[in-house]
Image (cartoon, rainbow, N blue to C red):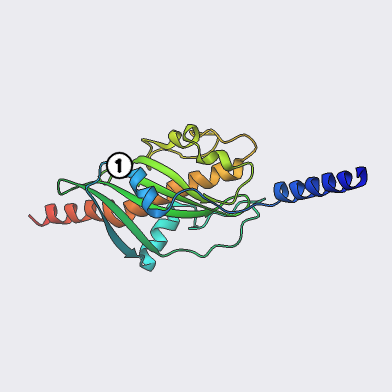
């Protein structure tokens, strides 16, 4: 009888070690749930899909250190393809666009981390953000509000860098830096596609008068 108990205990211990050693994907929010969290007061959400041109890709990469996917030394994440198609989800209240959300994935420590990042459509400053899914161990606290709230109100004029204006999760620098890059990229992509082009158009129109 004692021998059976010992075998059972060893089996439970082995299973526990296997579970703790593995890193499984965790889905926190579906797209619909994430957009509802970003825009709780929206009367409707409108999608605008854009495929980047090579000129746009070059401009965006120039502002992001020459990359669209941010791999870090020590990351065990699978390889990710550069995404050239982006969906911009606009919240609409009384016929006015009050926010825009972008879903962005970047490699974390153990696998891809998927974010939903809401911006002010006029300034591209962060209004809200959430982690939709991850394959992390120590980096799991990046989904908590006490980490994510650091990004609220920040825009392209802010560093958005670990050890500068963002406090990293202890023992999870790669996951923290992954979040910083995802937010920077969302801001840069939106600015290059919508805000910077609007500035140029207004300048051309003013010059023509």
Point out residue 22 in the picture as x, y percentages from the top left corner.
69, 52
Point out residue 15 in the picture as x, y percentages from the top left corner.
76, 50
Most foreground residue, 123 or 45: 45
Residue 88 falls left or right of residue 134: left
Instruction: Count the marks.
Output: 1
Point out residue 149 in the picture as x, y percentages from the top left corner.
43, 34
Q: Residue at x 86, y 44 (%)?
A: 5
The residue furthest left is 209
Q: Residue at x 48, y 33 (%)?
A: 165
Point out residue 190 in the picture as x, y percentages from the top left corner.
33, 52
Q: Quadrant of residue 94?
A: top left
Most foreground residue, 184 or 201: 184
Residue linked to disc 1: 40
Image quadrant holding the C terminus, namely bottom left
Q: Residues within 10 Å of mark 1 (few under 14, many from 20)?
A: few
Up-down: is 122 above or below 71? above
Residue 203 falls left or right of residue 101: left
Any part of residue 106 in sight: yes
Q: Residue at x 35, y 44 (%)?
A: 38
Any part of residue 187 in sight: no
Most foreground residue, 160 or 24: 24
Residue 45 falls left or right of residue 136: left
Q: Residue at x 81, y 49 (%)?
A: 11
Q: Secondary structure at mark 1?
A: loop
Most foreground residue, 136 or 13: 13
Image quadrant holding the N terminus, namely top right
Residue 118 falls left or right of residue 80: left
């Amino acid at each position: 009888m004692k021998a059976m108990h010992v075998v059972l205990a060893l089996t439970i211990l082995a299973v526990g070690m296997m579970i703790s050693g593995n890193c499984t994907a965790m889905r926190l929010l579906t797209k619909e749930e994430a957009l509802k969290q970003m825009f709780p007061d929206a009367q409707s959400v409108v999608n605008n899909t854009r495929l980047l041109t090579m000129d746009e890709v070059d401009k965006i990469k120039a502002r992001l250190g020459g990359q669209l996917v941010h791999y870090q030394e020590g990351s065990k994440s699978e390889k990710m393809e550069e995404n050239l198609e982006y969906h911009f989800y606009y919240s609409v209240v009384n016929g006015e666009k009050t926010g825009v959300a972008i879903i962005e994935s970047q490699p974390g420590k153990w696998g891809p981390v998927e974010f939903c990042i809401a911006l002010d459509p006029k300034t591209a400053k962060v209004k809200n953000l959430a982690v939709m899914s991850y394959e992390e161990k120590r980096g799991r606290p990046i989904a908590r509000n006490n980490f994510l709230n650091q990004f609220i109100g920040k825009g392209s004029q802010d560093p958005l860098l670990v050890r500068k204006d963002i406090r990293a999760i202890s023992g999870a620098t790669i996951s923290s830096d992954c979040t910083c890059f995802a937010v920077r990229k969302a801001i840069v992509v939106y600015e290059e596609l919508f805000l910077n082009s609007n500035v140029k158009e207004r300048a051309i129109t003013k010059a023509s008068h």
